[in-house]
Amino acid sequence: MRMSDKDRLIVALAAQLRAERETREALAGVIRNGQLDREVLLAILEDPVPALSHEDLAQADRLGSRRWTPPARAA
């Protein structure tokens, strides 16, 4: 089954959030353990975070610019 553009965007944003959380957890662990070596900190900071594609960003812009209208109520 093909995922909708909205579903793909949600999956991409979730992956990015997960990667950012892992980076924060790694940094917190380094600080807790007193491993504040320059090389360790640079390795954490340079760890690639998955980026959204241009297509995903364009879709986010389109979804964000739409005016939301509440669903019609049944009489």
Image: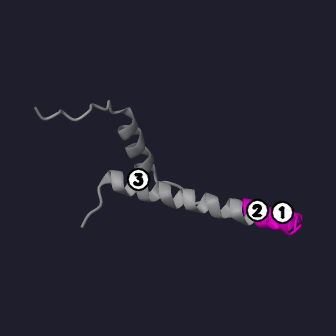
Name the element at disc 3: helix
Residue at x-position 64% and y-position 64%: 22
For badge 1, the amino acid type reads Ile
* Circle on res. 31: 1
Q: Amino acid at mark 3?
A: Leu
* Most foreground residue, 20 or 38: 20
Q: Nearer the viewer, mark 1 or mark 3?
A: 1
The residue wearing badge 3 is 9
Q: Compute the Cα span from label 2 to label 1.
A: 6 Å
The answer to whether residue 59 shows anywhere in this view is yes
Q: Quadrant of the N terminus?
A: bottom left
The answer to which image quadrant residue 25 occupies is bottom right
How many residues crowd mark 2 within 10 Å: few (<14), some (14–19), many (20+)?
some
Are dots 2 and 1 in contact, CB under 8 Å? yes
Residue segment shown in magenta:
29-46
- Residue 70, position in %: x, y? 26, 32
Q: Is residue 50 visible?
A: no
Q: Which residue lies under the disc numbered 2?
A: 27
